[in-house]
Structures are given as structure tokens and as C-alpha cells.
Amino acid sequence: MPDADGMEDNRRLAIDVEITRSRVMVMSESLYAQAERIHRLESALNSQILSYYDNYDKCRKKIQSMENRINRLEEKLRKYRPSSKESDKC
């Protein structure tokens, strides 16, 4: 039969094991919650990035359209503007 000190050591060890197990469970739950939060943040960030690129593409297309319109207007203006030779005649 184990002595009283040995039984007391075993009891303390069992208590320490339970405390450690509880701490590990709490830390695991905390890590899981943090992982879920990180996943949600990553999803939100990816959504914002996609929105940014979509807006960038829309702006790029509008700018290109305006540049094309400016070029057409400049071409029309050249047709109606007298050339330098014609303006010298006046």
C-alpha cells in the first residue's frame, strides 16, 4: 500500500493535470475563436479588394471613353478650324 506522501503527490499531480487540461481547453477555444475571426476578416478584406478592382476597372473604362471622346472632338475641331495658310490670307 502506498504511503500517505505518495498518495498526496498523486492527488496533487491529478489536480495539476486537470488544471492543465482545463487551461488547454480554454486556450483551444480561444484559438478557434481567433481563427474564425481571422477568417471573417480575410473574407471582408477579399471582398473590399474585389470591390476596389471593380471600381478601378470602371474608372479606367470611363477615362478611356472620355479620352476617346476628346480625341473625336479634337478631330472635329481640326476639320472646322482654318489651317494656318488660310488664316494668313485674311
Image: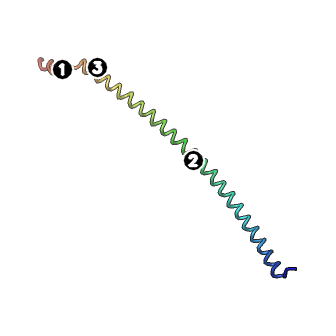
Q: Residue at x 69, y 57 (%)?
A: 29
The picture places residue 38, in percent across and down from the top left corner, at 60, 51
- On screen, residue 60 above or below 74: below
**What's the residue type where badge 1 is placed?**
Ser
Task: For the N terminus, give its image quadrant.
Answer: bottom right
Give SS at disc 1. loop
Out of 13 and 66, give the one closest to the viewer.
13
Q: Which mark is residue 83?
A: 1
N-terminal of the two: label 3 or label 2? 2
Give SS at disc 2. helix
The picture places residue 87, in percent across and down from the top left corner, at 15, 20
Out of 20 and 36, give the one closest to the viewer.
20
Disc 3: which residue: 76
Disc 2: which residue: 42
Task: For the C terminus, give its image quadrant.
Answer: top left
Out of 11 and 85, give the one closest to the viewer.
11
Crowding at mark 1 (Cα within 10 Å: few <14, some 14-19, many 20+): few
